[in-house]
Image: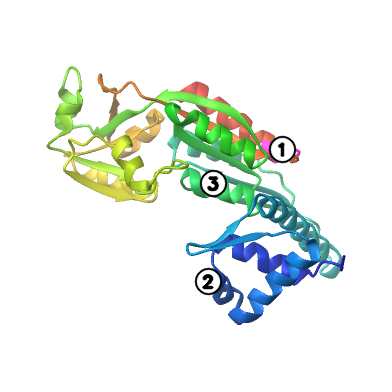
């Protein structure tokens, strides 16, 4: 077998990330035929099929998924060596974590930040949905992830984690609560039911995800059908601004620290009709050895979980 071409590794990673030869070629600034030829040469050199060519794009085969994981690790090590020897720069300690848009986790991250070491450190904190988190851990250079899903999808996710060679550990189980402005009509009800939400506006995150199910079906299952007005957002800052300004808006969330509620003039209430259980699950590659930074972050998440959930 020929020696591996480092550029070919980079090309394969980009194709896996985008799921498309054309998109990857645009990102890499190379011609599409040249990229296709390089991927084919890499597959021939390795003696495996990395990608399945379909009408939906370039899909990784099981062998391809395993290879891309190794390729990411190889390129990370090469970059570290180059920085250390070419530039005379010491290797930075690094934390890369992909998480749901959860305020208790954000609170844990803020507490973690108070004890960042004095030496050179790079930290990447990405809030996103479960699909993107799994991809970040499997194909990109993220080492830790926290995935959120409803308990009834437990077997789907655990099966996916096993297939992708991921370790998974339960962080927390909880019921969603409602948050709203202090003078919201909901805030004054002795008990809240789904029917009380009908004439109000719901904020929802726009990209729920469950393996094997379409986004439309997941949204239908996750969001009650009796709501006619919704605002879909992708990050937490805008949701708090909306909630703080409009008493007719509510949102389903994992329990939120009291100081955050006070900061935005909000209250949180349980809904008597909502009995669905959700899980936050820590994931990382089975061959990954946790660093001190990662252990410290996980510790803060566990502390925040015990305090707020």
**Left or right of 248 on screen, residue 173:** right
**In the image, is residue 105 part of the stretch drawn in magenta?**
no
Spatial separation of the CA atoms under disc 3 and disc 1: 16 Å
Q: Which residues are magenta?
A: 289-294
Tell me residue 201's x, y (percent). Answer: 19, 42
Spatial separation of the CA atoms under disc 3 and disc 2: 21 Å
- 272 or 69: nearer the eye? 69
Tell me residue 198's x, y (percent). Answer: 14, 34
Mark 3 vs 1: CB contact within 8 A: no
Q: Which mark is residue 13?
A: none
Above/below status of 3 relative to 125: below
What residue did someone put label 2 on? Answer: 23
What residue did someone put label 1 on? Answer: 286
**In the image, is residue 291 part of the stretch drawn in magenta?**
yes
Q: Which residue is found at the position 49% from the left and 22% from the top?
A: 307
Tell me residue 284's x, y (percent). Answer: 65, 39
In the rendered view of the protein, which quadrant contains the C terminus? top left
Mark 1 residue crowding within 10 angstroms, few (<14) / some (14–19) / many (20+): few
Tell me residue 222's x, y (percent). Answer: 33, 36
Spatial separation of the CA atoms under disc 1 and disc 2: 30 Å
What residue did someone put label 3 on? Answer: 133
- 245 or 282: nearer the eye? 282
In the rendered view of the protein, which quadrant contains the N terminus? bottom right
């Amino acid at each position: 077998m020929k020696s591996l071409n480092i550029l070919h590794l980079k090309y394969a990673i980009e194709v896996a990330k985008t799921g498309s030869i054309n998109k990857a070629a645009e990102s890499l600034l190379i011609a599409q035929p040249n990229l296709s030829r390089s991927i084919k040469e890499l597959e021939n050199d390795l003696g495996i099929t990395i990608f399945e060519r379909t009408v939906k794009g370039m899909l990784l085969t099981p062998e391809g998924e395993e290879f891309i994981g190794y390729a990411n690790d190889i390129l990370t090590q090469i970059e570290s060596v180059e920085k250390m020897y070419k530039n005379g720069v010491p290797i930075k300690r690094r934390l890369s974590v992909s998480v749901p848009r959860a305020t208790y986790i954000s609170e844990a991250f803020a507490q973690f930040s108070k004890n960042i070491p004095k030496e050179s450190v790079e930290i990447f904190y990405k809030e996103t949905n479960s699909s993107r988190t799994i991809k970040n851990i499997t194909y990109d250079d993220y080492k830790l992830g926290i995935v959120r899903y409803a308990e009834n999808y437990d077997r789907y996710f655990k099966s996916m984690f096993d297939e992708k060679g991921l370790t998974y550990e339960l962080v927390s189980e909880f019921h969603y609560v409602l948050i709203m402005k202090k003078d919201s009509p909901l805030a004054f009800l002795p008990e809240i039911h789904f029917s009380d939400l009908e004439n109000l506006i719901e904020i929802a995150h726009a990209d729920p995800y469950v393996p094997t199910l379409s986004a439309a079906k997941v949204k239908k299952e996750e969001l009650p059908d009796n709501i006619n007005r919704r605002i879909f957002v992708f990050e937490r800052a805008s949701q708090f601004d909306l909630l703080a300004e409009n008493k007719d808006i509510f949102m389903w969330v994992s329990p939120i620290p009291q100081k955050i509620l006070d900061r935005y003039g909000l209250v949180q209430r349980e809904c008597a009709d909502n009995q669905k259980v959700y899980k936050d699950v820590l994931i990382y590659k089975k061959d990954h050895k946790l660093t001190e930074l990662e252990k410290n972050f996980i510790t803060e998440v566990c502390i925040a979980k015990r305090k707020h959930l």
